[in-house]
Image: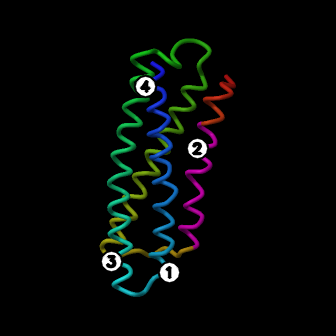
């Protein structure tokens, strides 16, 4: 079980590294008017999104293994796990939103400013803080 938990943490950290960096690429894309530079940045974003998606799949699979296979967070007194799973769904939604934004950049249809992406980039930080606090403190 500890091996599964350790790798779950590693893949979560790696997934979040991608979620932190991808919107930074979007900030640069939203500021860039040079077509060659935009093409390079879109390529970087595409590769990062694909790799981050693989990391997310493994992280979620390992989390499900811990939850279903070992029963971590199941039973009475584990309301924190339900709250955590809610935030995990929000994180998956954020990841999906990054993919939607990437497709808009690929199609040249972005309408948002670099300021929007700067704020958007803060969302995964808040989600990660919420999840870590729930897992460590287990407040309910």
Cα distance, mark 3 to mark 1? 13 Å
Label 2–label 3 contact, CB within 8 A: no
Up-down: is 140 above or below 132?
above
Principal SS element in the magenta part? helix
Q: Give residue 42's position: percent from left, percent from top.
A: 35, 71
Cα distance, mark 1 to mark 2? 27 Å
Q: Earlier in the sequence, mark 4 or mark 1?
A: 4
Query: Which range is magenta?
Result: 115-131
Dot 4 lies on which element? helix
Q: Give residue 16's position: percent from left, percent from top.
A: 50, 48
To which quarter of the image does residue 127 belong?
top right
Q: In this view, does 22 lie to the left or right of 140?
A: left
* Residue 39 image label: 3
Query: 19 or 2: nearer the eye?
Result: 2
To which quarter of the image does residue 66 belong?
top left
* Residue 31 image label: 1
Image point (35%, 40%), residue name: 57
* Residue 4 image label: 4
Q: Give residue 110's position: percent from left, percent from top.
A: 41, 74
Q: Which of marks 2 and 4 is in front?
A: 4
Q: Earlier in the sequence, mark 3 or mark 1?
A: 1
Q: Is residue 132 magenta?
A: no
């Amino acid at each position: 079980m500890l091996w599964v938990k350790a790798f779950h943490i590693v893949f979560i950290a790696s997934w979040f590294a991608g979620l932190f960096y991808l919107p930074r690429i979007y900030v640069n894309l939203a500021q860039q008017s040079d077509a060659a530079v935009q093409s390079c940045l879109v390529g970087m974003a595409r590769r990062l999104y694909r790799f981050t998606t693989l990391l997310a799949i493994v992280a979620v699979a390992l989390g499900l293994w811990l939850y279903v296979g070992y029963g971590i967070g199941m039973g009475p007194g584990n309301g924190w796990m339900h709250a955590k799973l809610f935030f995990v769904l929000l994180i998956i939604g954020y990841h999906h939103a990054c993919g939607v934004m990437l497709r808009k950049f690929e199609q040249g249809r972005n309408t948002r400013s670099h300021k929007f992406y700067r704020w958007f980039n803060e969302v995964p930080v808040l989600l990660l803080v919420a999840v870590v606090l729930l897992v460590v403190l287990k407040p309910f």
